[in-house]
Image (cartoon, grey):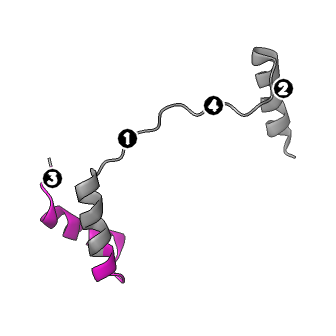
Amino acid sequence: MALSFIQKLLKQYRETKSVAPKVQTQQTPPKLNDEQSLILEGLVNKYNDATLKELQTLLKHEIDVD
């Protein structure tokens, strides 16, 4: 184990009296809604050898980008 990991556990124990994993808080919401995600999935299936940049361009043409 890395020294930094041990130090982090010790600090957490001093602050909370526990070394249990921290509860995850709310994550950043997805950028795409369900419909847009399905469109992207279709593009990935259709153009499975496209680069991320190419998929980004294709997706921008398919959806209304604010």
Q: Earlier in the sequence, mark 1 or mark 4?
A: 4
Amino acid identity at mark 2: Leu
Compare marks 3 and 2 and give the one earlier in the sequence.
2
Tell me where residue 20 appears, x and y as whole percent. Answer: 77, 31
Please rate how many residues cluster around mark 4, counting C-alpha atoms within 10 Å: few if below 14, some from 14 to 19, many from 20: few
Mark earlier in primary sequence (3, 1): 1
* Secondary element at image label 4: loop
* Residue tagged 4: 23
Q: Position of residue 63 (x, y in %)?
A: 15, 59
Counting from the top left corner in percent of width and height, residue 39 is at 24, 66
Front-most of residues 2 and 63? 63
Real-space Cα separation, disc 3 to disc 1, in angstroms: 17 Å
Numbered range of the magenta stretch: 44-65
Q: In the picture provided, is 51 more to the left or to the right than 4?
A: left
Residues under numbered marks 1 and 4 in contact, where contact means CB atoms less than 8 Å apart: no
Mark 2 residue crowding within 10 angstroms, few (<14) / some (14–19) / many (20+): some
Q: Which mark is residue 29?
A: 1
